[in-house]
Amino acid sequence: MAKIFTYRGKTEQELAALDLNAFALLVPSRVRRVLKRGFTEQEKKLLEKIMAAKAGTYKKPIRTHCREMPILPVMFGMKIAVHNGKEFILVNVIAEMVGNRLGDFVLNSKDTVHGGPGIGATRGSKFMSVK
């Protein structure tokens, strides 16, 4: 039997039915503060695009630089391209992501990979093969 996702006792359908004030009582304080103070202009534009895409009037892929936008129940099932500083990375928003921010799922830095030392770099490197 498949496990049903719940967030603080609410199922995905119950979360989608909540208004923002009721949803704000469930999320952590960092997200609650954003919901209480209101969204920035860029975040409002992103929400308008999401609502239009849900209604079927916005056909283009949703792309945004708003990495600090909290994930709301309205976004469940959407594909949003989030900028990582170099390119847009596609994020499939699912119910398990609620309470986080879009930027949490798009890494903006890669792991550092160092090569071997060059010839003459250290005393030990003179015994390394040149090939």
Image (spheres, rainbow, N blue to C red):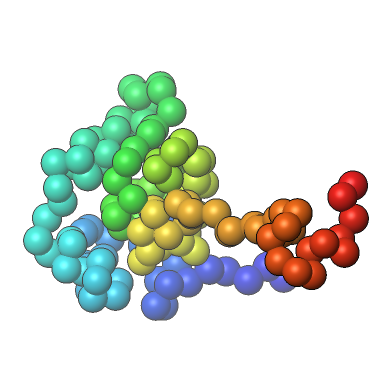
Q: Quadrant of residue 78?
A: top left
> Seen in the image, is 122 located left or right of residue 80?
right
Residue drawn at point x = 44 percent, y = 38 percent: 86
120 or 62: nearer the viewer: 120
> Seen in the image, is 46 located left or right of residue 107?
left
24 or 39: nearer the viewer: 39
Q: Quadrant of the N terminus?
A: bottom right
Q: Quadrant of residue 19?
A: bottom left
Residue drawn at point x = 21 percent, y = 69 percent: 32
> How many circles with numbers are drawn on the protein?
0
Q: In this view, does 17 lie above or below 92?
A: below
Q: Quadrant of residue 17?
A: bottom left
| Outermost residue, left side | 37
Q: Where is residue 121 in the image (x, y as percent from the top left)?
A: 69, 60
Residue 109 in sight here: yes
Q: Where is residue 77 in the image (x, y as percent from the top left)?
A: 48, 46
> Seen in the image, is 48 located left or right of residue 7?
left
> Seen in the image, is 112 located left or right of residue 66?
right
Q: In this view, does 26 lie above or below 65?
A: below
29 or 123: nearer the viewer: 123
Q: Where is residue 83 in the image (x, y as percent from the top left)?
A: 40, 41
